Amino acid sequence: MRMEKSMDELVILIRGAGEMASGVAHRLHQSHFKICMIEIPHPLAVRREVTFTEAIYDGEKEVEGVRAKLISKTEEIKSVWKKGDIPILVDSDGKKTRNFLKPDVLVDAIMAKKNLGTQINDASLVIGLGPGFTAGKDVHIVIETNRGNNLGKMILNGTAEPDTGIPGEIGGYTIERLLRTMKKGTFHPQKSIGERVNKGSVVAVVDDFPVMAKIRGVVRGLLREGVEVKKGMKVGDIDPRGKKELCFTISDKARAIGGGVLEAILYRFNR
């Protein structure tokens, strides 16, 4: 492909700012690309210390030395870039930001396990993370998000592995790591991210109903105070490895997916 822009002039729009989207954004930012992120008005991130979604609530969020800054107008994007930060806007369907930026690359990192409206003609290169996309149909390239030998792999034709509904194994545990509420209501954390807990510890309450840890470890992720949750919803997770510092760093999975997106961009434009 003949380049009309240099690599550092490419504009990349990322839909979503959750854990995987933030891992992608961090890696691309460190590679000196111009990144812009868009989110819904009230995102529900669990791993809040390593997700740029927190900027939606707090105005800005720093993850491993990279800062995302909330802006209200697309016209502010370039001024944020000049400061070396990542602009993030509330734009649920992405049309307003996409029409303004006319991005060279669009990454759908919502991780909804289905396509929520991304189309292959949204940019010169459209990348979808995980199941719900078909390479060559609604996106150009799919990135595998399932743990295993193919994690982070580019898929040029077809789809990613189907969602199993079982989280990846950490420290010998899978589903036991997750914190889920068995009641609809208002979420109130009783512990903090990075805090050690034992099996049976009350990590949060939904109204007056306790959410208890099923294993011993550290609280790696937890929803914000006061959010409304549904019955059966994931509200946090416990890391059985017990290393507090891992709660504040990008996961190996998010880094691998970020590497896959970087490879896809180079595959398409670095010819």
Image (spheres, rainbow, N blue to C red):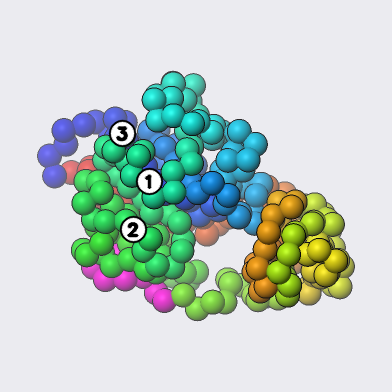
Magenta-colored span: 153-162
Classify the position of the C terminus by image quarter: top left
| Label 3 sits on residue | 100
Q: Is residue 131 left or right of residue 266?
A: right
Looking at the rendered structure, the kind of residue marked 1 is Gly
| x and y, in percent, of residue 24 in the image | 45, 48
Residue contact at pointers 3 and 2, CB within 8 angstroms: no
Decide: few, some or many residues near mark 2? Use Cα within 10 Å; few <14, some 14-19, many ≥20: few
Decide: few, some or many residues near mark 3? Use Cα within 10 Å; few <14, some 14-19, many ≥20: few
| Label 1 sits on residue | 94
Label placed on residue 268: none
Callout 3 secondary element: helix
Let me know if residue 48 appears in the view: yes
Q: Is residue 54 above or below residue 6?
A: below
Which circle's residue, 3 or 2, is located before the other in the chain? 3
Q: Which residue occupies the foreground of this view, 18 or 3? A: 18
Q: Is residue 238 left or right of residue 32?
A: right
| x and y, in percent, of residue 78 in the image | 39, 24
As measured in the structure, the alpha-carbon distance from the residue carrying label 1 to the one carrying label 2 is: 9 Å
As measured in the structure, the alpha-carbon distance from the residue carrying label 3 to the one carrying label 1 is: 10 Å
| Label 2 sits on residue | 117
Callout 2 secondary element: loop
| x and y, in percent, of residue 22 in the image | 51, 47
Q: Residue at x 61, y 54 (%)?
A: 45
Residue contact at pointers 1 and 2, CB within 8 angstroms: yes
Which circle's residue, 1 or 2, is located before the other in the chain? 1
Q: Is residue 209 above or below residue 47?
A: below
Q: Residue at x 44, y 68 (%)?
A: 113
Q: Residue at x 48, y 37 (%)?
A: 88
